Image (cartoon, helix red, strand yellow):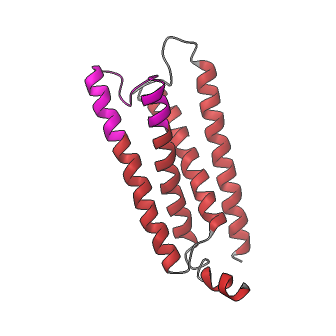
């Protein structure tokens, strides 16, 4: 059993960068999907682009949803390739997921919400608590991802 388990991941050090990038892509896709479903579709708090008509907002949501779908599916193909090459490294992949999710959320919260002003998290409320929670959660995801990735860097030496 130990030999079989060891053989399954024998090339993980060789593919450590691919594990990270596959996780980052998956994290981007999943968090974008969660954002789209919860905040855009279920709660109706905003659209991806809120500076035009509702129809344009729906089209922008559709494009955003397509991005999340393709990122997630693309990462699934890369993940399957890692397994085929016996290079999958769970902890490193999870680090990539947390990092990708956090980067997406921080980019969304700072660049899209504040600098580009494409949309806000929510309208007609005091936005400060939403922004603080959104960006602190993003930073926390990034920190978890970096810690996991640094731990796997240590093992590679």
Q: Assign the C terminus to one quadrant of the image.
A: bottom right
Q: Assign the N terminus to one quadrant of the image.
A: bottom right
Q: Where is 87 relative to 29, above or below?
A: below
Q: Residue at x 51, y 44 (%)?
A: 31
**Residue in the foreground of this view, choosing between 11 and 62:** 62
Q: Residue at x 51, y 62 (%)?
A: 21
Q: Where is 132 relative to 100, above or below?
A: above
Q: Quadrant of residue 50?
A: top left
Q: Position of residue 143 (x, y in %)?
A: 68, 48
Q: Where is 23 relative to 17, above or below?
A: above
Q: Residue at x 31, y 33 (%)?
A: 60
**Residue sticking out furthest to the bottom:** 3
Q: Position of residue 47 (x, y in %)?
A: 39, 27
Q: Residue at x 60, y 31 (%)?
A: 134
**Residue 42 in magenta?**
yes
Q: Main secondary structure of the magenta part?
A: helix
User: In the image, which residues are magenta?
Assistant: 35-64
**In-image side of 116 versus 99 (left or right):** left
Count of marks overlaid on the render:
0
Q: Position of residue 100 (x, y in %)?
A: 54, 51
**Residue 37 in magenta?**
yes
**Residue sticking out furthest to the top:** 124
**Residue in the foreground of this view, choosing between 124 and 111:** 124
Q: Where is 104 relative to 79, above or below?
A: above
Q: Position of residue 74 (x, y in %)?
A: 40, 60
């Amino acid at each position: 059993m130990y030999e079989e388990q060891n053989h399954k991941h024998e090339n993980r050090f060789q593919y450590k960068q691919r594990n990270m990038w596959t996780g980052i892509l998956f994290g981007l896709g999943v968090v974008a999907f969660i954002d789209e479903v919860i905040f855009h579709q279920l709660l109706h708090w905003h659209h991806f682009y809120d500076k035009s008509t509702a129809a344009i907002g729906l089209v922008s949501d559709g494009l955003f949803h397509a991005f999340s779908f393709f990122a997630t599916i693309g990462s699934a193909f890369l993940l399957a390739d890692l397994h085929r090459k016996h290079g999958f490294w769970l902890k490193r992949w999870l680090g990539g997921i947390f990092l990708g999710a956090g980067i997406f959320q921080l980019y969304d919260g700072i660049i899209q919400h504040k600098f580009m002003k494409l949309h806000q998290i929510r309208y007609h409320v005091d936005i400060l608590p939403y922004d603080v929670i959104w960006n602190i959660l993003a930073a926390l995801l990034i920190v978890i991802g970096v810690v996991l990735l640094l731990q796997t860097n240590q093992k590679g030496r």
